[in-house]
Image (cartoon, rainbow, N blue to C red):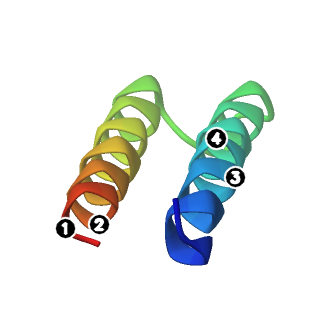
């Protein structure tokens, strides 16, 4: 596992956590959180597997 893949494994949960915290504060809707989560997971999976 290289440094870029390790970075993806660290940053992706942080992005999802940020979206969840923003939803709890009333800044993001539930649909926005779902979309942000799916986009983060999809992008991370794509970049992780193509490295």
Which residue shows up at 52% across the image and 59% down it?
1
Disc 1 from disc 3: Cα separation: 17 Å
For mark 1, does the 10 Å Cα neighbourhood hold few (<14), some (14 to 19), or many (20 or more) residues? few
In front: mark 1 or mark 4?
Answer: 1
Where does residue 40 sit, x and y in percent of width and height? Answer: 39, 51
> Marks 2 and 3: CB-CB under 8 Å?
no
Residue beneath label 4, please? 13
For mark 4, does the 10 Å Cα neighbourhood hold few (<14), some (14 to 19), or many (20 or more) residues? some
Disc 1 from disc 4: Cα separation: 19 Å
For mark 3, does the 10 Å Cα neighbourhood hold few (<14), some (14 to 19), or many (20 or more) residues? few
Instruction: Classify mark 2: helix, strand or loop.
Output: helix
Depth check, front residue: 23 or 48: 48
Disc 2 from disc 4: Cα separation: 15 Å
In front: mark 4 or mark 3?
Answer: 3
Which residue shows up at 71% across the image and 48% down it?
14
In front: mark 2 or mark 1?
Answer: 1
Q: Quadrant of residue 31?
A: top left
Residue at the extreme front of the image, as rendered: 1
Where does residue 49 sit, x and y in percent of width and height? Answer: 23, 56
Residue beneath label 1, please? 50
């Amino acid at each position: 596992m290289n440094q870029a893949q390790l970075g993806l494994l660290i940053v992706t949960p942080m992005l999802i956590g940020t979206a969840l915290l923003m939803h709890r504060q009333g800044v993001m809707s539930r649909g926005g959180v779902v979309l942000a989560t799916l986009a983060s997971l999809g992008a991370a999976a794509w970049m992780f597997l193509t490295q």
